[in-house]
Amino acid sequence: MEKKNEILSFLISSLKSRQVKLTSTRKAILEVLAENNEEMDVDQIYFLAHKKSPNIGMATVYRNINMLHKLGMLAKKLKSGSDKAAFSLTGKLKKDVPEEIKDKRKNKISASNYSQTADGEILRIQGQLNEALNDLNKIKIEKELALENVINDFSKLDKILETHNFEKSNLIQILLDVQGQYNWLPKHTLLYIGKKMEVPLPNIYGIASFYKFFNLEPRGKHSILVCTGTACHVRGSVNLLQRIVNVLGVNPGDTTKDLRFTLDTVNCLGCCAIGPVMMVDDKYYSDPSQADLNKILKNYN
Ligand code: FES
């Protein structure tokens, strides 16, 4: 009996090692044959296996006996004096297990892996969707803020227009007041003024572009003028201008992104003796070094 148990343990562990699932039916068949130590036909095996595992049916037992035979675990021969096949344990297992017999759990693991991959892909796509939604929300918030600003602008413009009684003859002064608010003339302000005053937009643009003191492009809060006149040029205004360009990151004629500074060049600032010279708003600075520039510009918020 001990030997049969050893054979049984060996067969069971062999099944597992070769990816053949040890179902309750297979286990019952092997146990029945191990315990009875004799050749048995399918009916006999089924009778005893059914006692061990009441849920198994004849067809299942028959199919599994054939499978164990294919694996080389059961020897098969005709019962003496009968046309029935009889089976007994061989105590061994074929080396090569047919693929169709192998435990399908391997495939299940693959399916599980596939499922994990799919889950990962879904998470990735969800992440991308969330990012896109965040971006859309940002755009929405930006647009709402922009709209809010425009609505606020309209009330400011209404006040300016009311101050000038909507008089067409006061158009230049109205534009100056608008520029006083923004440092330049944004397009939507010109559209609004034109509509309210019943003045065609081209006429307003005509005035705004005729006078040099009107700015149709955004201007920085502070103006930086660098003299490139002859006296300053011979004293090194080219180098000064380059230092300022390096600090601001914009070229002459441009405005910094934060709308703090607009850089321009002029031909003389009227203080040639201290050149090369630059002017920030209404203050003069004589040939500031890069370090000086950083300190000076920090004071202009
Ligand atoms: S040439 Fe530069 S201030 Fe006159």
Image (tube, rainbow, N blue to C red):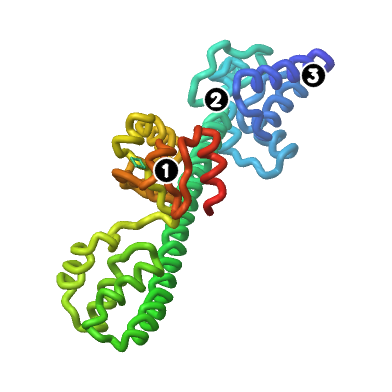
Please give the residue where the numbered disc 3 appears in the rendered image: 5
Query: In the shown orientation, is residue 212 left or right of residue 181?
Result: left
Q: Secondary structure at mark 1?
A: strand
Q: Secondary structure at mark 2?
A: loop
Q: Do residues under tags 3 and 2 come within 8 Å of each other at their CB atoms?
A: no
Q: Amino acid at mark 2?
A: Lys
Q: Could you classify mark 1 by the number of other residues whose Cα lies within 10 Å: few (under 14), some (14-19), or many (20 or more)?
A: many
Query: In the shown orientation, is residue 28 left or right of residue 60?
Result: right
Q: Amino acid at mark 3?
A: Asn
| Residue 234 position (above or below residue 222) | above
- Name the residue rendered at 38%, 63% in the picture: 183
- Name the residue rendered at 30%, 76% in the picture: 173
- The answer to whether the beta carbon of the residue marked 2 is less than 8 Å from any atom of ligand 1 is no
Query: In the shown orientation, is residue 13 left or right of residue 277?
Result: right
Residue 37: x percent and y percent? 74, 19
Please give the residue where the numbered disc 1 appears in the rendered image: 278
Q: Secondary structure at mark 3?
A: helix
Quarter occupied by residue 158: bottom left
Q: Tell us which disc is closer to us: 2 or 1.
A: 1
Q: Amino acid at mark 1?
A: Met
Of labels 1 and 3, earlier in sequence is 3
| Residue 222 position (above or below residue 164) | above
The label shown at residue 102 is 2
Of labels 2 and 1, earlier in sequence is 2
Q: Tell us which disc is closer to us: 3 or 2.
A: 2
| Residue 154 position (above or below residue 83) | below
